[in-house]
Amino acid sequence: MCGFVGIFGKNDVAADIYTALLTIQHRGQDAAGMVTYSTRFNLKKGNGLVRDIFKEKNFSYLKGNIGIGHVRYPTIGKGTVEDAQPFLVNVPYGMSLAHNGNVINFYSLQEKLEDERLRVLNSTSDAELILNILADELTHQIPFAIRGVFRAMDGVFKRVKGSYSGVSIIKDKGMIAFRDPHGIKPIIFGRKGDSLGFASESIALEILGFKIERDVLPGEVIFIDMERKIHHKRLREEKHSPCIFEYVYFARPDSVIDGISIYEARLRLGKELAKRVREESPNIDLIVPVPDTSRAAALALSEELGIQYREGLMKNRYIGRTFIMPYQKKRQESIRMKLTPIKQELNHKNVLLVDDSIVRGNTSKEIIQLIRESGANEVHLAVSSPPLRYPCYYGIDMQTRGDFIAADKSIEEIRKLIGADSLIYQTQEGLVKAVSGKLDMKFCTACFSGEYPVSLSEIDREHIERDRNRKQDF
Ligand code: SF4
C-alpha cells in the first residue's frame, strides 16, 4: 500500500501536494517524495515521514504548476532511498511517475528489459519499471500524439501484471493517470477551477478544496494536455476487482472509494458482525474498539446489540501504524508503546474488543493481555473481517503464508494462542455484503478467499516470497 497525488494547476503545486501527502501519510510511512516541473524536473525524496523529508527551503526550488507526490510503503524492492518515488527518465522525453500497487511479474519484466538491453534500472522499485516500460512504449509512438499515449499505455497494460494505479508527467506534453485493468488500487479524479488532480484517496483532494469528479475506471487512461484539456479512454474491460481491505483497514474513514464511503462501510461491517456475536452470545457488558480503524464497526455493533460502547484503549498518535511498519522487530516493540488502557473503564468488566483484522496475532495477544492486566474479568475478541489466510501479491505487506496466524490454525487454536475468552470472526459473505452496501460490486478478496483476480507465475511467486522473507530477516 502506498499513496500518491498528481496535480496539474495554474500556479505552483508543491504546497498543495505537500498537504495532500500529509493527508495520506497513513498509506505509507517508509519514504516520501515529490517532483514538480517548471523548466526542468525538480525532485525531492527520501526515507521517512512527509514532515521530515520536506523542509521550508525545499519549496523554493519545487517550482512548477504540474507535480506528483508519493508516500511509500515497501512491497517489492529493498526499501532503500533509491526505491523512493517518484522516478525520472530522460528518453524519449523527460518523464516522471509514481504509483500505488505491486507489479507481480516484476522480476520477469526486469530481467527481460535488462537482457534485451532496452533499459537499465537503478533501483528495485516497480515504479521505475513501469516508468521505463511506458518510456519504451512511447519510443514506438514518435512523433508525439495523444493517440500514441493511449497506444503506449495499452502496451503497458499488456506487459505489466498486477495492481498499479498512478500518475506520470511527460515534459511539455501533459499528465497521464492510469488504473490497472482490474482496478485493484484506487485512483480518484477531482477538479478545483482550472486545476485537475488525481489521488489514491478522495480526502487528499477534498482537503485542498477539489470537487471529486469520479474514480478512474479499471483499464482507463486519462491524459491531460498542456491546455489542461482532458482526453480519456478505457483500454481494457476486465472484471473490476477493487481491494476490499481498503474498506476494512487501509483507507481513511473520511474517504470515498469507487462510490463507497469508507466510514459507512465500516458501520455496516459492525452491523454484520453483530449477527455473528448474537450467534456466539458471549457474556459481555462493554464494547471497546481497538483504535482507530475499528471504531465505526464497534460503534455500530454496540448500537445493534444495545451494549455500552467505551474507549478503553488510547492511542499514541505519534507512533506509526504497527501493521505497516516494515520489519517484524519494530512491530513487536511498538504495540505497548502505541496503546494504553483506561483501567477505570475496564476494571471488573466483561469486555468485547473489536478489531478490523488479525494478521500474525501478536498485536491481538498483547492487547488482550493489556486489558486483562487492567482488571477485566473476561476479554472476548470480535473481528470485522474474516480470517486472513492467503498472501496478498498486490501491494500489501503480507506476501507469504507464514505471515498469517489463520493460515494453518483453527479458530479455536487462534483463540487459545491470543488468550481470548472467545473469538468471533466476520463471515466472507458478511464482509462483501457490508462493504458493497446497496451497490452490486465485486471485490478482490484474495487474502481471505484465495481467489486471485490476476494470476501469478510460480517463478514470480517464488521471487516475491523470497524477497519478503529476506526483509523479515533484516
Ligand atoms: S489480496 Fe487482500 S489486501 Fe491484497 S488487494 Fe486483494 S483484498 Fe486487498
Image (cartoon, rainbow, N blue to C red):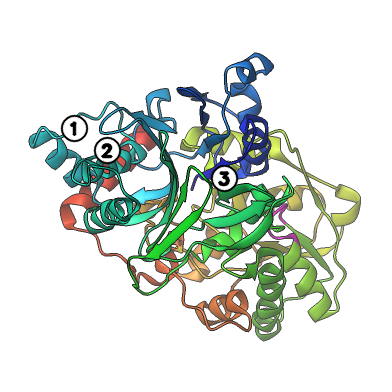
Q: What secondary structure is the magenta-colored segment mainly?
A: loop
Looking at the rendered image, the quarter that the C terminus falls into is: top left
Type of amino acid under label 2 = Asn
Type of amino acid under label 1 = Arg
Q: Which residue corresponds to the image point at 66% horizontal and 80% vertical from the top-left?
A: 272
Instruction: Tell me if 135 is positioned left or right of 323 in this view.
Output: left
Q: Is mark 2 on a helix, strand or loop?
A: helix
- What is the C-alpha distance between the residues marked 1 and 3? 30 Å
What is the crowding at mark 3: few (fewer than 14 residues within 10 Å), some, or many (at least 20)?
many
In the rendered image, the vertical position of residue 264 relative to residue 59, given as above or below = below
Where in the figure is residue 29, as x and y percent of width and height?
56, 35
Q: Are marks 1 and 2 in contact (CB under 8 Å)?
A: yes
- What is the C-alpha distance between the residues marked 2 and 3? 25 Å
User: Is 293 part of what is drawn in magenta?
Assistant: yes
Instruction: Tell me if 398 is positioned left or right of 14 in this view.
Output: left
Residue 27, labelled with which disc? 3
Q: Which contiguous range is marked in magenta?
A: 290-295
Location of residue 172 (image quadrant): top left
- Residue sitting nearer the eye, 236 or 275: 236
Type of amino acid under label 3 = Arg
In the rendered image, the vertical position of residue 287 relative to residue 362, given as above or below = below
Q: Mark 1 points at which residue?
A: 119
Where in the figure is residue 449, as x and y percent of width and height?
40, 72
Residue 132, labelled with which disc? 2
Q: Which residue corresponds to the image point at 69% horizontal and 75% vertical from the top-left?
A: 268
Location of residue 211 (image quadrant): bottom right
Q: Which residue corresponds to the image point at 63% horizontal and 70% vertical from the top-left?
A: 260
Q: Can you tell me which quadrant of the image ligand 1 is in?
A: bottom left
Q: Which residue corresponds to the image point at 27% horizontal and 51% vertical from the top-left?
A: 152
Q: Is there any visible trace of residue 397 in the rendered image? A: no
